[in-house]
Amino acid sequence: MKIVILGAGQVGTSMAEILSLEANDITLIDRNPNQLEGLQDRLDIRTIIGNGPHPNILEQAGIEDADLLLAVTDHDEVNMAACQIAHTLYRTPKKIARIRATEYLTHPEIFCNESIPIDFIISPEQIITQQILALIENPGALQVVEFAGGRIQLVGVRAYFGGPLVGHELRDLRKHLPMINTRVAAVYRHDRPIIPLGETIIEPDDEVFFIAAKAHIREVMSELRSVETPGRRVILAGAGNIGLRLARTLEDNDYRVKLIERNPERIREVANLLEDTVVLHGDAADQELLWQENIDQTEVFCALTNADEANILSGMLAKRLGAKHAIALVSRSAYVDLIESSVLDVAISPQLATVGTLLTHIRRGDMVAVHSLRRGAAEAIEAIAHGDPATSQVVGRRIDEISLPPGTTLSALVRGDDVIIAKGSTVIEAEDHVIVFVIDKQRIPEVERLFQVAATFI
Amino acid sequence: MSSPTHLNPSGSSRPNGVLHGLLALDQVAIDVSVSSKKRLMEEVATLLIRGNSSLNKDTVFHLLVARERLGSTGIGHGIAIPHARLNGIQTPTAAVLRLTRPLSFDALDGEPVSLVLALVVPADATETHLQILAALAKLSDDPARRADFHAATSCDDLFNLLT
C-alpha cells in the first residue's frame, strides 16, 4: 500500500517503522529536518521536508498515488487541514488523523466528507487507556483485547501452580467449566508457540491465550491461576495525557485512585479535572512516599511517565514494596522484551498498542479489528466473511474444511447478536465476523487472501 | 472473429460482444498511463460516468476502491474487472482501458494488469448482471482474444472487439 505519513514525532516515526516492515511504500513528511535525519537510511522509507498540508509538499510525497494519508502531527488543526486538502484535491481514499482535543472529539459529526473528511480518528492516549483499564479489570492478565465491540475478549495469561487446569489436558477445561464456552487459541511455552490440541497438557509458566465472552473471562482465568478478588486501589505515576485520562476512567469505574506527579504546575491543572482522585506531589521512585501511600495495599501500580527508565524503576520498586501488580509504559521495544513477566507484570508499548488500529485499515479484506500481540510477533484479527461458496474460501464451509495457514486458529464467530465459540463443525456464513489468531505474523498475507472474495464477487 | 454467445440484459441470447449495449466509444481508452492503482480507479470512474449522466465520479471511485479492498479484481493474464454496485441506476454501464505500462494489481496470478474491463451495475444486481461479469472474467481464459485486445490499434478496434 502507498502511504503518506505526516508528522515524524513518536507516533509517526514508529508507525513508519512498523509499516515499512510489511511491504508498504511509505513517505514521511515533517517540517523539521532534524526529526527526519537518519530515518531514510535506517528505515526503508522516503522522507520529505516541508509543511505537510501544503499541496506542493503532499504532491512531492506522492499523495496523488497514495491509498492512505496518516496525519499524526502534534497539532490537531494541521492534521485536519491535511485530510481536507488530500480529500478535495487528490481524492485520497482513506484519511486517518490523530485528534487529541476533546473539544473536537465530543463533536464526531464534524468528521464526515461534507465537513472535515477524516475516515478514522486515532487517539493513542485513548487506546492505551483502554488497554490498561482492561488489565486492571482482569488482574493477572498479560494482555486483553476486545472484538465485536467488546462482547468477545481475547486474554493472555500466565499459568501458575494452583490453577485447576495446570497439569491437566486442555480438554479438561470443558469438564471443569461445563457451562462456559471458551477456546484456547494459542499456548506459548518458553516463548515458543505450541499448537493447542485437546491432549495438550498445560504446564506452569505457560502463556495461554484464550477467547471467551467478556462475562466469562474471570472464570476461565481462574482455571489457570489462583483466583484473585480484584482490589480497587490503584496508584498511577505521571499525570500526562495518559495518566490523566486513565485516572478519570478509573474514577468512573469506582476505583480509588492516587496520582503521583512531579510538576506542581501540572498538578494544579489536573487536580481541577479530577473528582475523587488524590493527586500527590512527588517522585514515584521515592520509597518513603510509596510507603506513606500504602503501596503494600495497592492492587495495581501503573508507571505512565514519558521516561521508560523511570517507569521501569518505579514499577520495580512498587512491586518490591508490595504492590500486587505493576504495569509500566515502555516505548523501547528492547526494554519491553527484557522486563516483561520478569521484573514487572506487564510492559505496555504505546506503539504496538496503537499500530493495530492502523493495521485494521491497511490489511486487505474487510477487517474490523487488528490487535498486535506478543510484542508484535502474533496478531489477532476480526474479519468479515463475504460472498458465497463460489466466491469465498470460507463461506459455507465447516471450519475443519478450511485450509488454514499453519499456526492459525479460527477461534470465534459473531453472527448478528450471537457469539459463537468455534468448533470444527461450525459452518461459516456470509457476513459472519470471524476472530482469527495468527501465531506468526508472517502468515498474515495468507490469512488476508483467505478472506478475500473472488474477482467475480459483486 | 467470433464472439461467444452471451445473454443480454433482457435475457435473450445474442451473438454480440460481452459489452454490447453497455459501452460507448467514449468509454474506451488506449494508451492510458497511470502510476498507481488509485489513479487508475480515478480514470476508470471518469470513463464509467460517461455512460450515465446521473453518476457521480467521486461516488463511483470510492465504491470501486471499496470493492477492490474486499479482494482484487485482477483475474489473471493481465486483465482486471473492477466493478461496483450502485444505487440509482437502472442499467449497467462499462468502461475499457488499456494501459501503456502494466500495473501491479495484486492479481490472482501475480501478473501486472494492462487491460481493464470495468462495470457498474444497479444495487439490486440480477442474475443477468452476474452473467455479464462472469463473461468478462472468462475473457482472460482465451489466449486468442487476449492477443486481439493487445493488438488493437485504436479505441474503435477495442470497442468493436467487445461490443
Image: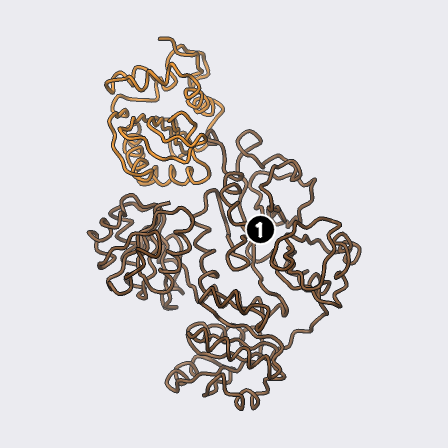
Chain colours: A brown, B orange
In this orientation, does residue A457 appear?
Answer: yes
Relative vertical location of residue A391 with respect to residue A230 in this rendering, above or below: above
* Rendering quarter of residue A110: bottom left
Q: Is residue A284 left or right of residue A136?
A: left
Q: Residue at x 52, y 41 (%)?
A: A446
The numbered mark 1 sits on a residue in which chain? A
A195 relative position to A122: left or right: right
Q: Residue at x 53, y 40 (%)?
A: A451
State the image coordinates of residue A107 (x, y, percent, origin top left).
38, 62
Q: Position of residue A219 (x, y in %)?
A: 71, 63
**Residue carrying label 1:** A439
Q: Report the front residue among A177 and B51.
A: A177
Picture layout, residue A162 above or below residue A261: above
For the image, the number of numbered tags is 1
Q: Secondary structure at mark 1?
A: loop
Q: Is residue B109 above or below residue A306?
A: above
The vertical placement of B20 against B84, above or below, is above
Determine the residue located farthest toward the left in the rendered image.
Answer: A56
| Rendering coords of residue A275 (x, y %) | 49, 81
**Residue kind at label 1, given as amino acid type:** Ile
| Image quarter hosting the N terminus of chain A | top left
Measured as percent of width and height from the top left, residue A164 is found at 77, 63
